[in-house]
Image (cartoon, grey):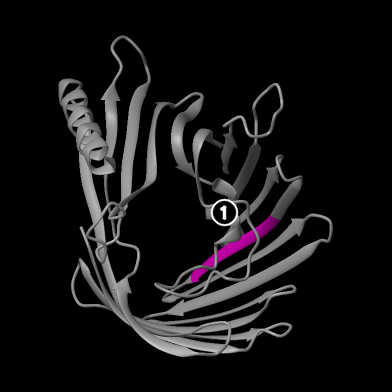
Amino acid sequence: MLLRTITLTVALLCIFTYANAAEITPYGTFNYKWSHDENSSGVAYHKLEDNGSKIGIDVDDIGVEGQSIIGFAKLEVGVDTDDSGSDTFDSRLAYVGLSSNSIGDVSVGRQSHPYTDNVATRASIFNVYGGNASFSYGTRSSNSLAYSNNIGPLSINALTVVDGSSGEDDGMDSYEWSASADVLGSNVSAGYADDIVNDISYYGVSAKTTLDKLTVSSSYTIKDAATDLAAWEVAGKYSILSVGYGDKENTGTYTTIGLAKDLGPNLTVYAETEMADNDGSIVDTEKWSIGTKFTF
């Protein structure tokens, strides 16, 4: 059923965009890995599996007759290359919007969370591991309304989810925002997310600095619930080597090391390991993966 829906949606988008002289860009990633993992009891196992393969289309410059605005759209699905049944495809992103130089971009559909993308996962630079030491509301949500704009040196992104689960008259279930700017050679972001349904809020800051071949990214996030929890993470990349460390309160610390080598403009091979020093009675774990990624 999902495959038929995806096929129909792609066909309709192509017809609509062709008629309006839009620019259509297909893209995708095939990502596969061999992993050595350990479960929470310390039992080790090996596994060959898909590592987040996906396909999608970007649609830009959709003409709006008689208006100084343009339309845009995106459709992206995850592809589980190990599945031969009904779970091969899953919806990642699906939205449509309008863009204006004067008022910014507005879009609706299934979209990514700006607080998560720009603040919480800023130090998530690896192909398999990393990104564990942060707090955020979610990654992608349906029933969402998003807004973005550049105001002087400041880049603003906001999103709200309205699916009716809050029980409130306005129907708003969550909202979040992030603001980013270049400061003293670094790109710095701050953000906030409010999970209205569960009465939990998240806030934090992040930064990214590039010096020649060295790039350093970091984040500090707080989960404001019955008990406040904090997490921080820093990761650096120099040439083919990446190293990261994170500390998540009441969870543990994580050390991640990775190597990634581009064999061409579209093909990358990588190897990574992560050592987790877990809090409480959960045993410490050590994992490693090797894999290859093809993009187009």
Q: Position of residue 243 (x, y in %)?
A: 50, 82
Q: Is residue 131 above or below residue 1?
A: below
Q: In the figure, residue 28 lies in which quadrant?
A: bottom left
The quarter of the image holding the C terminus is bottom left
Taking the view exactly as shown, the residue that stands out farthest to the right is 226
Q: Nearer the viewer, residue 108 or 24?
A: 108
Q: In the figure, residue 40 lies in which quadrant?
A: bottom right
Q: Is residue 20 above or below residue 196?
A: above
Q: Position of residue 279 (x, y in %)?
A: 71, 82
What residue does disc 1 label? 116
Residue drawn at point x = 39 percent, y = 43 percent: 93
Task: Name the residue type under label 1.
Answer: Thr
Q: Is residue 153 above or below residue 102?
A: below
Q: Position of residue 102 (x, y in %)?
A: 49, 24
**Magenta segment: does it hold 205?**
yes
Residue drawn at point x = 63 percent, y = 42 percent: 177
Residue drawn at point x = 74 percent, y = 73 percent: 249
Residue 88 visible in the shown view: yes
Residue drawn at point x = 63 percent, y = 34 percent: 165
